[in-house]
Image (cartoon, rainbow, N blue to C red):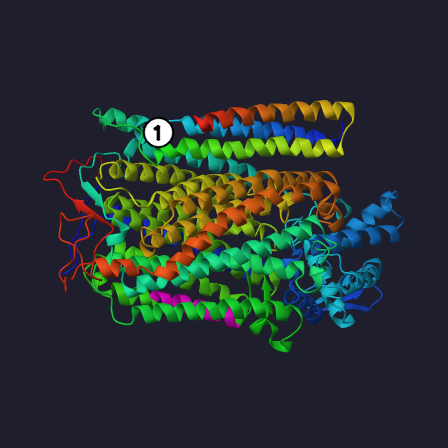
Amino acid sequence: MTSSTTTPGRRERLIGRGWIQAAALITIFGFFVLVLMGFRTYMDSPPIPERTISQSGQTVYTGDDVMAGQDVFLKNGLMQYGSIFGHGAYLGPDFTADYLHRSAEMVNRAYGGADSGAATRRTIDDHRTNTYDEDTGTLTVSDAQAAAFTELTEHYADFFASPEGKTGLRPGAITDPTEIRQLTSYFAWSAWVATAERPGENYSYTNNWPPEPLVGNTPTADTIVWSVISLVALLGGTGALFAAFGRWNWLGWHGRDQQELRFRDPQTVGLTPSQRATAWFFFAMTALFLVQTFVGAASEHYRADLNSFFGIPLDKWLPYNVMRTWHVQLALLWISTSFLAAGIFLVPMITRRREPKGQALLAYLLLGALVIVVVGSLVGELAGMRGAFGDLWSVFGMQGFEYLDLGKLWQVLLTVGMVFWVVILWRGMRGRLAGESHANLPWLFFFAALALPVVYATGLLTDNDDVFTVTDFWRFMVVHLWVEDFLELFTTVMVAYIFVLLGVVREKIALRVVFLDIVLYSAGGVIGTAHHWYFNGSPASVMALGAFFSAFEVIPLTFLTVEAWTFIRLGARQESKSPTPFPHRWAVLFLVAVGFWNFLGAGIFGFLINLPIVSYYEMGTGLTANHGHAAMMGVYGMLAVGFAIFALRYLVPKDKWSDKAASISFWSLNIGLAWMVFVTLLPIGILQLHRAVDVGYYDARSLAYVSSDTNTVLEWLRLPGDVVFIAGGVGPLLWLAFLGIRHRGRHALTKAPLQTGPTAGTAGALVPEPAGESEMTLFTEIIEPPETTHRGS
Amino acid sequence: MRFEPGFIACYTLVLIGGAAGLHRLGKVDTSPWRSRALAGYRRAVPDPPDPGPPAWPHTESGRLHTLMALVVAVAAVTLPLAELLRYHRPVEVAVLGTVALAAAAMVLRLTTALRR
């Protein structure tokens, strides 16, 4: 299992060649399939007809109308209100399903009504027969469909221009008749895509989504068969992995380790200027977290009571789509802020050398840039939805793609900011990297960090001028690939490295965990991105690949949760040997919570909605929100807070630090999240899924159903949990972060000279260091035994 | 019995089961050495490492599971009680009341376990 090579001047490689080859091959395979799916998406995405005419020859709408309608949809933040092809928010209707159902009813009435078998058949024929002529770019629809379009234009004019509001949107949100017509054209086109059969196939461009019996939209054979295969893949894959693990003990951490550890009192760990600068990052992170919970509570209130916010007409100024946009964007921003800060905080510990001059200044510049992007993008989204930027709406205002709502300028600046952050890490690590094998932890840490701006940058290819299917492909490069895979990888490297720096896990073992993570996620996660594209106009082959490989995505979640626990257990065994107390109990407990929520929120709740046949009825309902909250807050949120608690332990002096505050925050965040999930999101989601199968998807997504009495009761029942989450969870955290900026690790400056380290054997004591010592104080002093027994590697 | 109270009663039973399961899970020894998955490795290496006394954070694991189970159990009491305010046909009162009582018993049990 062990093999190593030594390059002159570099530390030897600590991991076997087989691990590197396996990781490289599987990564290449994963990305090859992803590129292939991208190619198929470009080739097979549904066409946008140049003109759509009625049988009597009148123009119904044009291709330009459809594209302009997409712009109206995006810049008004309607993807953060309702959804299109099932993608978007969950308060408003799914506009594809909404248009389709209403139009089908009108066509059916025109042909004689629901009692007439002939009318039913004609309605289905009108919708399913693909009358698009590729040569002329003309789509011909029946006169009944053209009449329905006119009628529905009036319906949407009433809906969007309503002066009373009470829909969650701003009263009189869209009043321009041209824009209403364009918007209706966009909905009409999406409904056509959802029902017209693909050339040569017996299902529509969206694999017959949404379910709509009026037009004969039922699950396809692929939807059912690939659901079954996906289940088999999950069961078989999990069994195979655990069997192999039991047989070979790849990771080799079940052996005995005889090192002696002495954890340094955080008080004695001198911090570098850039580490001290991270105090401001963690304060900004907590402040953003607090704002995110407030706007989350406001958007939740819209689901409980559409009429007013305790008597205040909130929808006039801060309608639901603004609140949800901010809620979603801030989730990414505060978590990213913590990750950026944790990276900066760790670098001096990794290098154990003096940091280059100006690192702190660069860190402050990064924070300043981050604040500008956060404030600029949030204000831009609010103003953009009110039409503030004219033709430049997608640059400065609301770009409008869910999770990529921020204007293009802010998106570019955020990418540049992340590149700037990588430069900061590079400056700090350059000396250390020069002496390391490329397969060792320092390089992996750098590569994982470098991947973050690179993958995020692919989201810049989303374009409001592209057909939705194509632009959705790029959107999920951020929503899935960046968030679910590359953030996960960076997280694994960070946690592994923190454990190595604390001395509780050996570097070899940590390396194996990281490589295992790369192997498992490249197989399941990268190709599994396609589980978002089952019904957005991508071909059936994409659905097949997505269903099959995303099942494998759950396996590493299960496996790594088990492994993470072992990892922590191992750390605990080591920790118990230390004569000095372990300072990071609460940071490690947040990691335990990550394991819990990773399994429940990402694994169970994620797989619950992953099968194509479930997704067919479920997409865009409460069960997606259930998975989203339990996984995003449960995994990344808890991690971000854990990183903050870890760093703050060094930034806040011992006599000011409050374990009580950390404890209250930990329990309140977990209790609040569990309450939110089990009292509201899960039951509401199950009821909505039942409604979608029983009555119809259109009905389950209607505003009338969402604001029904049953839902209202369940939404209100969430209130106590939210209060615990915000007051008990975020409040104490904000206090600790405030203490962080107030003291910023200055206490260590006076007791142990900065950027120097004590000699071995003096851990835990406040011993002044000889100035000019090149090595920094580490978190832990590790004393190697004369002879180490280490089995299993 | 109407659909909604029926659903909530069933969901409550699932929550009670979930709470019991979580509490039980917290008591399980998660030592990797005792894992069934490692049977092959155990055979190959007959000299097991000394597991030692339960160490932190393992000692915290049971508490975390029990507390989460308690949250789930309190949710299981709340939901049928809220439904009782909306649905009070005799059969609905009987069913919702029974599951609420069962959930309350679970809350009591978990509270006692947490105090120990």
Q: Residue A79, image x and y in percent?
A: 64, 59
Position of A164 with respect to A265 (left or right) is right
Q: Quadrant of the C terminus of chain A?
A: top left
Residue A207 seen from this side: yes
Quadrant of res B72: top right
Q: Nearer the viewer, residue A182 or A436?
A: A436
Q: Which residue is mark 1?
A: B37
User: Would you say the magenta stretch is mainly helix, strand or loop?
Assistant: helix
- Amino acid marked by disc 1: Ala
Q: Residue A779, image x and y in percent?
A: 25, 51
Asked if residue A440 is among those painted magenta in the image, a careful observer would answer no
Quadrant of res A738: bottom left
Q: Nearer the viewer, residue A488 or A767?
A: A767
Q: Quadrant of the N terminus of chain A?
A: top left
**Residue drawn where x is 41% and y is 46% of the image:** A662
**Residue drawn where x is 71% and y is 50% of the image:** A305
User: Looking at the image, is A362 positioned above or below residue A559?
Assistant: below
Helix, strand or loop at label 1? It is helix
User: Looking at the image, is A404 positioned above or below residue A543?
Assistant: below
Chain holding disc 1: B
**Magenta region, residue range:** A409-422
**Residue drawn where x is 16% and y is 57% of the image:** A768
